[in-house]
Amino acid sequence: MPLNLARMTEKQTVLLHLAVLIALTLLAYLEVRHHYFVWDTIPFVLENPWIHELNANNLVSIFTEAHRANWHPVVLLSHALDFSVFGDDAGKHHLTNLALHCINVLLLYWLVVNLLTRFHQTNEFSIWVAFLTALIFALHPQHVESVAWVVERKDVLYTAFALASLLTYLRLNTLANAKFRDHAWPFLFFCLSISAKPMAVTIPVVMLILDIAPLNRVRNLNSLFMLGVEKLHYIVLSAVIVLVTLSTQSEAMPGTAKLPVWASTLNAIDNSWFYVTHYFWPVKLSPFYPYPQEVSYLASWRFWLPGSAFLTVMTVSTLVLLKRGYTWPFLLFAFYIVTLLPVSGLIHVGPAKGTDHYVYLATVPLSLLTALAIVAAWTRLGVSRLVASIFSVTYISFLLLITQVQVSVWNNPLSLWTRVTELHPSDPYGHRNLAASYVQIGNWDLALQHAELSLKLGSPDEAYVIKLRTEYERLKVDKGNSEPNR
């Protein structure tokens, strides 16, 4: 019997949406069950002694100590649970990431429904926008490394609790007589989120944005101040986490800490536009985006002008529209900038100028904007539903295809670093790691070739290349000695 969407009740439509969301997410990502551990998963996860056995001593270490310059006890606890159930089966660890991504998709669906309800939208409009928002979020290629990289359990886990915190915060502000537990739920989820990844320090600010729109709780500067006081416990915890993070990560920042302030600032400005362009045209996504080799390039107008223009135009236009009563642009733009800010590049860690997993949560407003445009086109702008549906199916199919290709890139270290060197052939970091990948499979000729190339391109890791040469020569001697006399 054919499915008649026109005769479906609202509840049936929602259930169908949820089923399709999960089915397409699994279709896009189920390949990860065959993936291997890649990049820094071995030192972060496999070699972490605290998560191989759940006992009192390890639990104390998980919650009281930093591991490899990170304090994220909730993440380590999730890895410990994985090990207790799955051992070191890489595929099962990846499936946990996928399960959390599915949870985030469903949470986002309900968050958007609640947001649109606050804006007095019809139920039909709300659930279709929510469906498209969640579907775009589920299938967008920028999110692949958060799902297909076990180390980025941090992203999917902190986002799950962050979305739950925002969802319960919206619910709290609809209650006429809120009880203690109604206030406790948003804060509890916030605590769990910030214990998974320090990026959750932005959640109190996002709550203030929601107070402005759609909750309309801000009447003047005094009311804004009082809403800040209302969130004092969030702010205090955020400040503590920021101090802890800066302290624990100071050892991981020696290379980039030498960057001048102006260089870091211009990089952050460029990244605000860099991620938007990758969102709307997600081709040639790379697991690693190298920082410009010459710092002076950052002073070039070609580098900083697009980001500066984007921030200026969006800031001015959203504030003007907000003053005239149009709150949606402010909500979307402010959400994006605030959630991106901690990883924008102002404080830069590591050799990359940016990375796609940084915007796992920050792309929520971009997904919502796209969904609003599509649904509004057929409901309010006169575009036929058939045309809007064809466009939606084409767009979703495009995302699904690109995501599946990107998922395959993360299958193993060799596929990962081969892709990086294809996209960034002059970057020494990619060739150095590709050399290590060839060592893992015993291809010493190609390993040494890429190691030597990394040195020529400016890699500071000369000791690794020397070690590789020595081992290569030793293996050649051993091979010669083991060959029979003819």
Image (cartoon, rainbow, N blue to C red):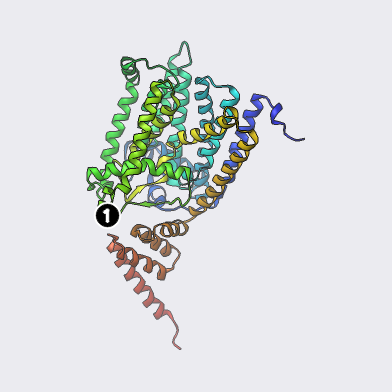
Residue 356 picture location, percent across and down:
42, 45
Left or right? Give the position of 58 relative to 126.
Answer: left
Residue 335 picture location, percent across and down:
40, 31
Q: Amino acid at mark 1?
A: Glu
Residue drawn at x 27%, y 34% is 243
Residue 429 picture location, percent across and down:
34, 57
> How would you rate the neighbour count of disc 1 (Cα within 10 Å): few for under 14, some for 14-19, many for 20 or more?
few
Q: Quadrant of the N terminus?
A: top right
Left or right? Give the position of 49 relative to 136.
Answer: left
Residue drawn at x 30%, y 38% is 245
State the count of labels: 1
The relative height of residue 173 versus residue 306 in the rendered view (above or below) is above
Q: Secondary structure at mark 1?
A: loop
Which residue is farthest right? 1
Splitting the image into 4 quarters, where does residue 230 fall? Answer: top left
Which residue is farthest bottom? 486
Residue 220 picture location, percent across and down:
33, 15
Residue 274 seen in the figure: yes
Residue drawn at x 46%, y 36% is 366
- The one nearer the camera, 448 or 332, is 332
Residue 344 seen in the figure: no
Q: Residue tagged by mark 1?
A: 294
Which residue is farthest front? 382
The relative height of residue 295 versus residue 466 in the rendered view (above or below) is above
Left or right? Give the position of 25 relative to 422.
Answer: right
Residue drawn at x 55%, y 37% is 135
Left or right? Give the position of 242 relative to 273.
Answer: left
